[in-house]
Amino acid sequence: SNAQAILSDGIPKISNNYLRGIEEETTCYELKNTYTENIHGCEYYLFDIDNNIINKYNQAHLVSTGDYISEVILDGKNKTYTVVVTGDIDGNGKVTLTDTVAIKMHFSRTIELEGANFQAADTNGDSRVTATDYLRIKYHIQKKYNIHDNEDFSADEPSSSEESSNLYDEENWTSGWM
């Protein structure tokens, strides 16, 4: 799937059982006002990763990678869709340095990103987690790039020559991290 196509109109969309296109630090209340039940097609509830229902007026809970929505359908065949907040690999609703550490650990095979966490790390929707995804998140944190916009990404401005060499070869690029 192409992440840019999913995000093109600013409204979250469902793709492969994931709800994508939610920006970091979005509250449940904001989600319900943006991604209305009319847009979704039926009533739905938001649950956190621990299966706790989040009240639609909740201004405190940040919608996070790993949360999910469950449809309310009268025939009892409720469908659920897992939330993916691009860049929010650790599931706290924000894009932070902890998320870059998760990618580094994935590259060094200390952890294996899977499911929604992998989807959050795959910032360009190419079904791979690469050094480019790492740099997009890093630059987003540094406010040099917005991973939620449709702008093209160029790694022409790495912060060190080490990052620019072997950019697409994670094996060499990540050696010495752990």
Image (spheres, rainbow, N blue to C red):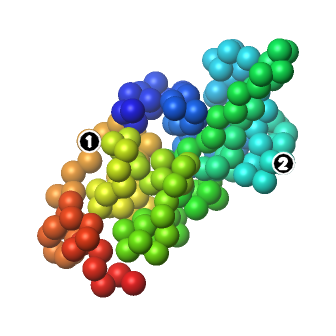
Residue 45 is situated, as x and y percent measured from the top left of the image, at 79, 32
Q: Residues within 10 Å of mark 2 (few under 14, many from 20)?
A: few
Residue 32 - label? none
Would you say residue 67 is visible in this rendering?
A: yes
Residue 158 is situated, as x and y percent measured from the top left of the image, at 22, 66
- For the C terminus, the image quarter is bottom left
Front residue (pair 75, 147): 75
Give the residue at x 61% y 42%.
83
In which quadrant of the rendered view does residue 17 lie? top right
**What's the amino acid at mark 2?**
Asn
Residue 74 is situated, as x and y percent measured from the top left of the image, at 85, 15
In which quadrant of the rendered view does residue 167 lie? bottom left
Q: Residues within 10 Å of mark 1 (few under 14, many from 20)?
A: few
Q: Earlier in the sequence, mark 2 or mark 1?
A: 2
For residue 89, above or below residue 31: below
SS under mark 1? loop
**What's the amino acid at mark 1?**
Asp
Residue 152 - label? 1
Find the distance from the CA under tag 2 to the CA under tag 1: 37 Å
Q: Nearer the viewer, mark 2 or mark 1?
A: 2
Residue 168 is situated, as x and y percent measured from the top left of the image, at 21, 60
Which residue, given by chain and number where applicable, does mark 2 sit on? 52
Front residue (pair 27, 132): 132
Residue 71 relative to residue 8: left or right = right
Give the residue at x 62% y 57%.
91
Give the residue at x 65% y 20%.
40
